[in-house]
Amino acid sequence: MPGPGVGFEYPPKSVSWCKRDLLLFAQSIGCKAEELHFLYELHPNFVPFPTYPLALSFKLDSSDVVDFYAAQKSIAIPGVPVFDPARVVDGQRRIEFFKQLPTSSEGKRFESRTKVVGVYDKGRPGSVVETQTDIVDAANNEVYSRIHTSSFYVNQGNWGGPKGPATQNFPPPKDKKPDAVFENQTTPETPLLYRLNGDYNPLHADPEPGKKMGFGGVIIHGLYSWNWACHGLLQHLGGSDPANIKEYQARFTSPVRGGDKLVASAWKTGEIKDGWEEIRFQVQIEGGKVVLSNGRALMKCVGPAPQSKL
């Protein structure tokens, strides 16, 4: 028997983007000058970075800032409590890539279509809402990408709901040297740039929400670290070619603050199916906590990115 809220479909929402949005996204997650096909609109192979569809679930069709809390409150899920969006953090994200987005939505009508997969009561720590969001060409219902989201509502549990299934884990291989290691020195401005992609949660700009949630102040978007790590994998293992990644996921385990140095380690498992190799990875603060765990990608490993040419 389906649990509370399962199968509930939110009304479809229009999404749109232009080339400038793609350039901003690529810049904000660390794409390099040698990857001009992500950073220069006149490059003959200009393409969106593959995880850009995830930004559309926040941006929608707005070209200006949006009220994050108001947007999250818009629709209640039947059969479950009304959760406070001012106390929500990312749990885990996974994205499947089916078709490359065009460099602009102009001339087409795209929609973000979201349905509830599960709502779970984790007791005193909070509740988990799992959703599936498809980015779809509304004219023919073709799905370009599918985003699986696990959102954690802090201290909003104990309402009598199901505990939920055990999660599948993808730990790094033991006693094996990483096949790729890459680093990133964040700054206090890192979240202020990334939020311009459409994720305007005040938690990433105003110290007060973070203090109320026990983080001590502003924290960097988990999705910044998530997207940055995907870029590093594609850059170091997939030749910076979007065609070389099929699926990508990671779990958010610890907050990151501006000024923290991120270190990602990735391992090729040698497990290949239909040409796609399973990659496992994790991201940690240098000398400290793991911030992204359960990292897994399906890739075609061709080596580092070549020098971009016009």
Image (tube, rainbow, N blue to C red):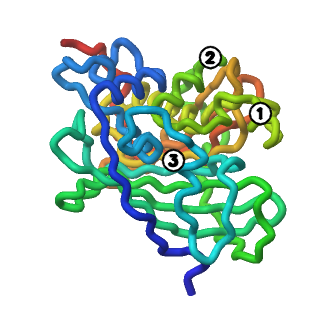
Q: Is residue 179 visible?
A: no
> Mark 1 — residue?
208
Q: Callout 2 environment at 10 Å: few (<14), some (14 to 19), or many (20+)?
A: few
Q: Please tell me whether mark 2 sits on a helix, a strand or a loop.
A: strand
Q: CA distance from mark 3 to mark 1?
A: 30 Å
Q: Residue at x 75, y 65 (%)?
A: 122
Q: Earlier in the sequence, mark 3 or mark 1?
A: 1
Q: Please tell me whether mark 1 sits on a helix, a strand or a loop.
A: helix
Q: CA distance from mark 1 to mark 2?
A: 24 Å
Q: Please tell me whether mark 3 sits on a helix, a strand or a loop.
A: strand
User: Is residue 22 placed above or below 54 in the rendered structure?
Assistant: above
Give, as a three-letter code, the residue at label 3. Answer: Gln
Q: Callout 1 environment at 10 Å: few (<14), some (14 to 19), or many (20+)?
A: some
Mark 3 and mark 1 residues within 8 Å of each other at the beta carbon: no
Q: Residue at x 76, y 60 (%)?
A: 156
Q: Earlier in the sequence, mark 1 or mark 2?
A: 2
Mark 1 and mark 2 residues within 8 Å of each other at the beta carbon: no
Which of the two residues, 254 or 27, is positioned nearer the viewer here?
27
Which x, y percent locates residue 115?
46, 66
Which x, y percent locates residue 62?
39, 39
Give, as a three-letter code, the residue at label 2. Answer: Gln
Tag shown at residue 185: 2
> Mark 3 — residue?
249
Q: Residue at x 40, y 64 (%)?
A: 11
Q: Is residue 199 visible?
A: yes
Q: CA distance from mark 2 to mark 3?
A: 22 Å
